[in-house]
Each structure stands twice: as C-alpha cells, then as structure tokens.
Amino acid sequence: MVNITIDRKSIESWLGHGMVVLQDASGNVLGTFVPEASDDEDFQELSDEEFQRRLNEGGGRSLKEILADLERLQ
C-alpha cells in the first residue's frame, strides 16, 4: 500500500461530501475516497435489528425478471 499526503485545502474541499471520486485532468477516474467517518447513509454501519428488517423486507425483482427485461432491451 502507498500513502499519499494531500494538502489541507484539498482535504477541506472534500469534507462533508461522503464518498469522493478522484479524477485526473482529463476526467479519467483514478479511484474513490471514502472518509473513515462519513455521514453518507450508504456507508453507515447498520444495527443488527436494521439489517434484519431490511433483509426481511422483501420486494424488488428476481434475477430472472431482471435478465428478461435486459433481453427485451437488446
């Protein structure tokens, strides 16, 4: 693993944005940065109760249904 030091101005511009996509000057994606302490809901740890609730919630579509829809689009 390589450690890279980022200047303070860059760090301050990223704070509060959750996950940040890093790109070069041409717009090519180099990677993503996810702060260790993020307010972004996608990265918050779920309680066991919330995990079970979401697991049992159901809904959505089966893989078979999704693949059938994709076939119809071709």
Image (cartoon, grey):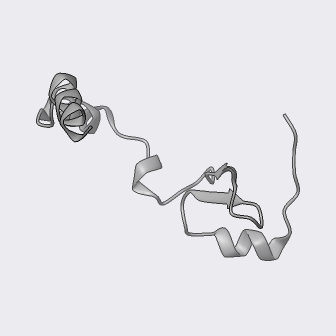
5 or 29, which is in the foreground? 29
x and y percentages locating residue 29 in the rendered image: 67, 53
Where residue 56 sits, quadrant-wise, is top left
User: In which quadrant of the rendered image does the N terminus lie?
Assistant: top right
Report the number of numbered marks: 0
73 or 23, which is in the foreground? 73
Residue ID at (61%, 51%) = 34
Residue at the top extreme, as displayed: 64
Where residue 51 sits, quadrant-wise, is top left
Residue 50's place in the image compared with 32, above or below, is above
Residue at the front extreme, as displayed: 74
Residue 58's place in the image compared with 35, above or below, is above
Residue ID at (22%, 31%) = 71
Residue ID at (68%, 75%) = 13
x and y percentages locating residue 31 in the rendered image: 68, 48
x and y percentages locating residue 48 in the rendered image: 31, 32
Residue 38's place in the image compared with 67, above or below, is below
Drawn side of residue 66 relative to residue 24, left or right: left
User: In which quadrant of the rendered image does the C terminus lie?
Assistant: top left
71 or 24, which is in the foreground? 71
27 or 36, which is in the foreground? 27
Residue ID at (87%, 39%) = 2
x and y percentages locating residue 45 in the rendered image: 43, 42
Drawn side of residue 52 relative to residue 2, left or right: left
